[in-house]
Image (cartoon, coloured by chain):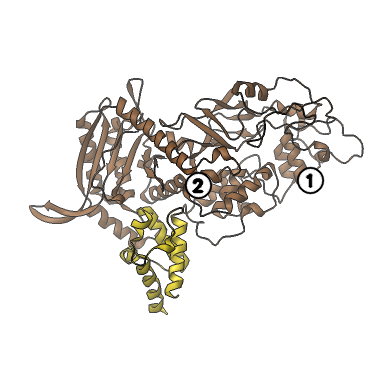
Chain colours: A brown, B yellow
Amino acid sequence: MAEFRMPALGADMDEGTVTEWLVHPGDEVTRGTIAAIVETDKSTIEAECFTPGTVGTLLIQEGTKVPVGTPLATILEPGAVPETAPVAAMPPRTGRGSEAREGAEREGGAPETVPRGPGVPEPVKVEPGRTEPGEPAVEPARPEPVRVRPRPKRVRPASGKPAPARPAAVSSPLVRRLARERGVPLARLHGTGPDGTITRGDVERASPGRVRASPYARRLAAEARVDLAALPVSAPDGALHAADVRAATTTPGPRAQRTTPPAAPASTESAPGPASAEAPALGAATAAPTRAAQEAPTAAAPGNPRAAPAEADKDAAMRRAIGRAMARSKREIPHYYLSATIDLTRALAWMREHNRRAAVSDRLVPSALLLKAAALALRTEPALNGTWADDRFVPGDGIHLGVAIALRHGGLIAPALRHADALALPDLMHGLRDLVERTRRGRLRGSELTDGTITVTNLGDQGVDAVYGVIYPPQVALVGFGRVAERPWAVDGMLGVRPLVTATLSADHRATDGYTGGRYLQAVARLLQRPEDL
Amino acid sequence: MTTDDARTLIDDVLREIAPGMDDPAGLAADADIRDALELDSLDFLNFVEALSKRTGRRIDEDDYPELATPGGTAAYLTGQEAGRG
């Protein structure tokens, strides 16, 4: 059985806190499904699951901080039924060795989720891990089930007699709950699952007109002020996922919906579902769209004091995280440094012409041209693009530029702009704006923090002439751009005034020599003389 | 649009694009917006884009220097309106 573990989201991360689960037992996950919101010392990250299958048990409750590599959830074979499902359909057994409990014991702190006491008259639905942070974990003295959902009595088809043990074969307790919330009588449904069991999709199909969406999709939609009901659903389970909202909000431009007048928050629509428990959280996040970017991680988990340390603590944690990675870099990587001054006359003239014709949303900034040139030049110098692991260079699986982005109140994060060399400039520009926006809002995906094959830092806006960066391990190079400024420059034997930029390269001497680095900077300079080809 | 209207609009937009920074309403009319709110070139583009959308006006890149301060931006927005009105 596979496990979804606390991901290592970069050299500066030792541990992380699951602040919100976005999947639940019984959910199908595919490669790249965003399974949880994880808070690290630096940011709030959408953690992806890379094992396709069915979520079995959530082993960690929201608000728990665990080291990198800790199992967070079990992932069963695709289509498998989580162990909790039969439990819900049968009278509870006490003392059963569920995965939830094994996980709880292994992690020493996950909640007890098994119904307690022999007097429970009816099947009780159990949802491991879906607990409120801060609640006491176990209260053995209570005769009532601990932390269980409402009993399924109301779910049952109204028969007037005690509910039978199996009124309908249902694939999971979640499906049962969904049916109850939708008011869909299970007895009338035709199961399409294994052995004729009723699946979530069956309930979805029987309850038209309602929008079911993941809590995260709801939050994204609320932030983007998009009506969930208007979005097409792509997933086979019939629910709207974050990807659907993204698809709708990232075209044509990432900010397309930003400036529309505030509509009624999406959270006010009556769309109960597994998401209903998150409705208050959504409302809280929606109510403060202009809150500080640094508070965004806090907004992700309102009511969870552990996930919202004081600003000073967060700043300190950020400094420690950066310190760990940079100290490791300086300790392990023998840096060499090169610089080259590049004439941007042609590039900027071309950009101005482009921007004159373009709508504001399609305009370029010099950074976009510099990033594109930095990416393209790696095609001819691939030895700078990749990572150093086990005493050897591992080439990158593409040119994914880690773009150093300053946070508004200090600190920085360098998420990856994937395949930047293949992006047309307007696409690269949109990608860059989207990345900056999400970085500052705490909406990065975990893979974006780990995919970078080189880092580019641009301190031009801060007015510095040149930046000699510290390589972000395990990468082997970092490209820096300083300020674009008009300076005297010799052209054809004459002194002229030209817009110039100093490009620098910090590179790992284990992977390359200065000769390679020099060729790389030359290539960047050459590319910027032909902006129309960028 | 009066100068006060324009300033209100400018402050709203700045709050939106640079959340968590100093309240733009406290900026002097001749303060450098980029410096005061630590805006980078992408932030400034967002500023221009939002102003353009809210007012329905095209703002050309050549006009950017006029948008350096709240006062300059307000004059730009109201002046343009008067010129076209």
Q: Point out residue A304 in the picture as x, y percentages from the top left corner.
A: 59, 40
Instruction: Give whichever of A474, A65 is nearer the camera.
Output: A65
Identify the image quadrant of the N terminus of chain A: top right
Where A344 sits versus A419, above or below? Answer: below
Q: Going by the image, does A232 lie left or right of A476?
A: right
Asked whether, in this view, residue A155 is left or right of residue A49, the answer is right
Per the image, the residue denoted by label 1 is: A183
Is residue B56 something that shows in the picture?
no
Q: Which residue is rendered at x = 49% and y = 52% of the image?
A: A251
Q: What label does residue A295 carry, if any?
A: 2
Residue A461 visible from this viewpoint: yes
* Farthest-out residue, left: A493
Label 1 residue SS: loop
Depth order, front residue of A187/B21: B21
Image position, residue A203 (x, y; %): 74, 41
Query: Which chain does the residue under circle 1 lie in?
Result: A
Instruction: Report which quarter residue A241 is drawn in.
Output: top right
Neighbourhood count class around disc 1 (C-alpha, 10 Å): few under 14, some 14–19, many 20 upward: some
Task: Look at the numbered disc 2 and give the secondary structure of its residue.
Answer: helix
Q: Name the side, left or right, on which A43 lies relative to A280.
A: left
Vertical position of residue A85 compared to residue A257: above or below: above
Residue B48 pos. (x, y %) = 40, 61
Q: Are marks 1 and 2 in contact (CB under 8 Å)?
A: no
Q: Which mark is residue A405?
A: none
* Amino acid type for the residue under numbered disc 1: Gly
Q: Chain of mark 2?
A: A
Front residue of A466/A161: it is: A466
In this rendering, which labeled residue sits more in front, label 1 or label 2?
2
